[in-house]
Image (cartoon, rainbow, N blue to C red):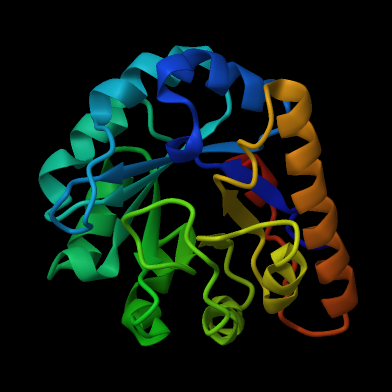
Amino acid sequence: MTREILIAPSILAADFARLGEEIAAIDAAGADWIHCDVMDGHFVPNISYGADVIKAIRPLTKKVFDVHLMIAPADPYLEAFAKAGADVITVHAEAGVHLDRSLQAIRALGKQAGVSLCPATPESVIEYVLDRIDLVLVMTVNPGFGGQSFLESQLEKIRRIRAMIGDRPIRLEVDGGITRDNAAAVAAAGADTLVAGSAVFRGNGSADYAGNIAAIRIAAEAGRVRKLPDSSTQPMRAGESARLR
């Protein structure tokens, strides 16, 4: 049995003047997770929002809050994001010198721990922390701005990380330029969790968002079916589906 495909709309692409309505719309539209991109204007060349915004929108949905910290340093702020309502907290391997310590701190807060890799970062940096993580996030654009084009060079990295994960209960997430046109290739490479911003928040409200999410999901599932004979999709361990849904 393979891990189900999850679609995690990034609220970075939402209309911030109507953020509460946008959260409700993607919830109703079939989003599996809510992806929260936190940018500090230092680690990446943009500023988005912080823990207070996440705290404010947390009561609006019961969906998993997938919080991607594009900040450096991250450690001083982990507790704030945990208290704000994050379910998964992902830090960048490039953002600190003690990745293992950061992951231990996230888990000590009772949260799922993730590691993100920028396009130029090799997958070897996660080799010695694989047993401390619940998620690997591969950036398929250079982080800092929404609406960028997908970097096809990252498909091979996704394949290599899928092989590294093996049968561990780790989700493989991809973020950056994901659309219905490339979702099949991403899933075929081994990803099981797809972040999409602009490709989801097209149109006017829940009905349009539902169609966008469905199109990405259908494409990803089709790509996975074509790849099933390959060992890149591994069975879940008992209880995994209950941990990260």
- Residue 178 x, y percent position in the rendering: 61, 59
Is 48 displayed left or right of 34 in the figure? left
Q: Which image quadrant: the C terminus?
A: top right
In the image, 217 versus 206, the foreground residue is: 206
Give the vertical position of 184 relative to 175 (above or below). below
Residue 115 visible, this angle:
yes
Q: Nearer the viewer, residue 164 or 238?
A: 164
Q: Which residue is drawn at 15% across and 68% down?
A: 98
Residue 202: quarter of image: top right
Give x and y (percent) for residue 25. Answer: 64, 20
Figure quadrant of residue 16? top left
- Left or right: residue 39 versus residue 183 is left
- The residue that appears at 64% across and 47% down in the rendered structure is 199
- Residue at image location 75% in from the left, 63% down from the top: 181
Q: Can residue 239 be seen in this view?
A: no
Res 47 quadrant in image: top left
Residue 207 place in picture, x, y as percent: 78, 24
The residue furthest front is 203
Residue 90 in the image: x percent, y percent?
36, 52
Give me the residue at 12% from left, 54% from top. 73
Quadrant for the N terminus, please.
bottom right
Q: How many marks?
A: 0
| Along the line of sight, the residue nearer the viewer: 219 or 76 | 219
With respect to residue 152, does 17 lie above or below?
A: above
